[in-house]
Amino acid sequence: MSVTHQTSMVSCIFSPKETPDQVSLFPSMNRSPRFSLHSDGHIHTKFCHHARGEMEEYILSAIAAGLKEIIFLEHMEAGVHYFEKTWLTEDDFDLYFLEGKQLQEKYQQDIHVALGVEVGYSPTHKKELLERLKKRKWDRIGVSYHFMIHPRGEYHLNLVSRKKRSIRAIEDVGCKQVLENYFTTLTEAVEILPGTVLCHLDAALRFQPDVIINEDYLEQIRKLLQAVNFKCHSFFLNGPGFTIRDVPFNAFFILKEAIALNIPLLPGSDAHRPEDVGRHFDKLAEFTQGACS
């Protein structure tokens, strides 16, 4: 794992008087959170049932990488009918907070540990999601859309799964139809949920062969980004794209659109293993430089 802290970051990210430790992506704007290559803002744990490693292992990995902050974002879903559970129950969240608070105290002199949630939006269960969110104090609320109801209403499609049965199910429905639904529903999610950051924009169908989210969807993407901007959300640059497709999520043309709207950008590894904390942060910096030019 390599986390490179570059003092020559692009001028559109760092103002001349600031250092890369923690600086505003757009210094003229009073918006938070702040862009920092010393903070990994998108981390998962074993509690989501598809990540591995103890919470403490993620923290130790972050400290070893020289990070000053780690933000856990664990999965919340409602009303999903799928063959496996990839999210937390309320009992899981109880354990998540119990362990997380103990680790916050243990490592308070070494690193800032925050406890957040990645909410998977459900148009049919938005009331339940809103009620559950109100019950806890979250350090960050991320907005996502992972599961789309099958047109026949039998079960949900997992839009970010690498499993063959999920890939085949999406192909049977039609990738174009699924993506159009994805952008429309994700825009609704941003408008309704009390989020602070958009976790994924173009990660849907990331494992579908030969499917690339390009400018054919630009009109829908612009509407989504306008909703993000209106709600004063931030926007994740997720490193896993470099592993999956050799480019980050979000794509270059989407990043340029976000920068044009002055939407603050946050780096995140979306780590599901301790060794992936801070993954590809050096590449995120280089990629952003090109988008700002």
Image: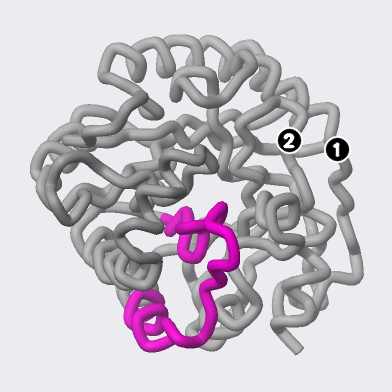
Numbered circles on residues, count: 2
Tag 2 and tag 1, C-beta contact below 8 Å: yes
The residue under label 2 is which amino acid type? Answer: Asp
The residue under label 1 is which amino acid type? Answer: Met
The boundaries of the magenta stretch are: 197-226
Residue drawn at the location 29% of the way across and 32% of the way down: 82
Residue drawn at the location 32% of the way across and 46% of the way down: 157
Does residue 214 show up magenta in the picture? yes
Compute the Cα span from label 2 to label 1. Answer: 7 Å
Which of the marked residues, 2 or 1, is nearer the chain's N terminus? 1
Q: Nearer the viewer, residue 136 or 280?
A: 280
Q: Position of residue 224 (x, y in %)?
A: 35, 75
Q: Position of residue 228 (x, y in %)?
A: 37, 70
Q: Nearer the viewer, residue 111 or 203?
A: 203
Residue drawn at the location 65% of the way across and 21% of the way down: 108
Label 1 residue SS: loop
Label 2 residue SS: helix
Q: Position of residue 115 (x, y in %)?
A: 47, 30
Q: Nearer the viewer, residue 152 or 52?
A: 152
Please name the residue that numbered disc 2 is placed on: 276
Q: Is residue 69 visible?
A: yes
Please name the residue that numbered disc 1 is placed on: 1
Identify the colour scheme used.
Answer: one colour
Q: Quadrant of residue 248?
A: bottom right
Q: Nearer the viewer, residue 14 or 255?
A: 255
Rate crowding at label 2 as few (under 14), some (14 to 19) or many (20 or more) other CA atoms within 10 Å: some
Using the image, determine if residue 286 lies above or below residue 155.
Answer: below
